[in-house]
Image (spheres, rainbow, N blue to C red):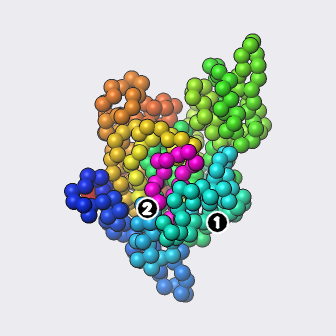
């Protein structure tokens, strides 16, 4: 049976049909009010986590804070107590601890004056606040989920749909998996199989990005090249993102597949205890070739395609994936005409990845359905 996925196209037919109005329509269509309203059990407050990404310093394609404010308003109208939240990063960044993360969120406009809700870093000041959640799946018996997300009664997941270096794409499922995990959980998901292939020019960009000082430069035959100390590596893959020559990758052929499966098992743990109390909005705008964790913003891969919502993250990510693949390119992809469409653009961008395995595996472990019906609102 097909799952409804609601689509708000970005065409403006009248002045009042702006993007904030579209977000409100999507929240209504997906039944946000019923999912977040107080249940009246013992007079408890209905605390609602709005999961999002506040953007890395230097990045400007993260979701706009006024989009989050519209969702905050919808949650409050339903009687919920919303807070905006994310977790600390594994790599060195302006979001590595809660203090820096909050300052970054504020600089990017996520202040109470704009969003009318507090920002809470879900895994605590130094990413030590989390709970073990049993999942009993292929890769993990239990996963580590940030405490604030576990404590929330309901959740609204706001995701910027874009490419990802290892997962192919990042949408609602990845937002749940990496975004709800503390640093220890991110290490679980990433693995430790980084390798440096021939062709390194010794630029040192990977060295600067490594949070564990596992990378260094050595000189051989009058040229420098990077080397890795695998005993120190935590598998954050920031070196993979940093390498403009594309010579840093993983040394196991199936690692990209395993990485995706580990993410999906974490996503499964993130939603436990909130069955029927989560809704998802994906913004298929600024579909960049890097995720928002990069400290810069790449050109968009395809035109802006709309905002989508669903109660099923598998159906939602599948619909977004299909829309992107059917859209014309805005950047050149090897082996494809600039305006060609109808193929996996994320795999064309990074041949080792297969983003569709996210939705396939998530469906297999019971997170939702890939069968969807697109409903325009």
**Is 63 contained in the magenta span?**
yes
The verdict on residue 157 being magenta is no
Q: Residues within 10 Å of mark 1 (few under 14, many from 20)?
A: many
The tag on residue 147 is 1
Question: Any mark on residue 66, and which?
Answer: 2
Residue 218 at x, y percent in the picture:
76, 23
Tell me which corner region of the image, top left, top right, bottom left or bottom right, holds residue 58. Answer: top right
At 63% from the left and 53% from the top, the residue drawn is 95
Can residue 94 be seen here? The reply is: yes
Q: Position of residue 287 (x, y in %)?
A: 42, 43
Report the front residue among 162 and 320: 162
In this picture, is 98 found above or below 202? below
| SS assignment at label 2 | helix
**What residue is rendered at 33% in x and 25% in y?**
337
Residue 95: which numbered mark, if any? none
Q: How many numbered tags mark residues here?
A: 2
Q: Which residues are magenta?
A: 50-66
């Amino acid at each position: 049976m097909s799952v409804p996925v609601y689509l708000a196209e970005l065409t403006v037919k009248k002045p009042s049909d702006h993007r904030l109005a579209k977000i409100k329509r999507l929240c209504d269509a997906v039944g946000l009010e019923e999912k977040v309203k107080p249940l009246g059990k013992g007079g408890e407050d209905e605390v609602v986590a709005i999961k999002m990404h506040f953007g890395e310093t230097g990045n400007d394609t993260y979701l706009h804070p006024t989009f989050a404010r519209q969702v905050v308003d919808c949650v409050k109208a339903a009687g919920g107590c919303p807070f905006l939240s994310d977790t600390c990063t594994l790599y060195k960044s302006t979001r590595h601890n809660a203090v820096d993360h909050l300052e970054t969120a504020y600089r990017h406009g996520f202040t109470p004056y704009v969003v009318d809700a507090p920002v809470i870093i879900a895994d605590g000041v130094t990413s030590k606040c989390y709970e073990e959640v049993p999942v009993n799946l292929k890769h993990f018996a239990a996963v580590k989920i940030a405490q604030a997300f576990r404590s929330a009664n309901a959740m609204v997941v706001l995701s910027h749909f874009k490419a990802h270096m290892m997962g192919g794409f990042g949408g609602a499922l990845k937002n749940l998996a990496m975004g709800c995990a503390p640093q220890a959980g991110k290490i679980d998901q990433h693995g430790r199989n980084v390798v440096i292939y021939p062709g390194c020019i010794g630029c040192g960009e990977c060295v600067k990005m490594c949070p564990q000082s596992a990378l260094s430069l050595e000189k051989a035959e009058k040229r420098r090249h990077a080397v890795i100390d695998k005993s120190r590596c935590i598998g954050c893959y920031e070196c993979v993102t940093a390498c403009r020559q594309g010579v840093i990758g993983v040394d196991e052929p199936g690692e990209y597949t395993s990485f995706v499966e580990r993410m999906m098992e974490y996503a499964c743990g993130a939603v436990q205890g909130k069955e029927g109390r989560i809704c998802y909005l994906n913004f298929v705008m600024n579909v960049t070739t890097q995720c928002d964790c990069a400290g810069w913003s790449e050109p968009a891969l395809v035109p802006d395609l709309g905002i989508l919502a669903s109660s099923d993250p598998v159906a939602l990510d599948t619909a977004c994936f299909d829309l992107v693949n059917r859209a014309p390119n805005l950047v050149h992809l090897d082996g494809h005409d600039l305006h060609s469409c109808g193929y996996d653009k994320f795999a064309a961008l990074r041949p080792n990845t297969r983003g569709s395995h996210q939705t396939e595996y998530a469906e297999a472990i019971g997170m939702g359905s890939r069968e969807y019906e697109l409903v325009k609102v």
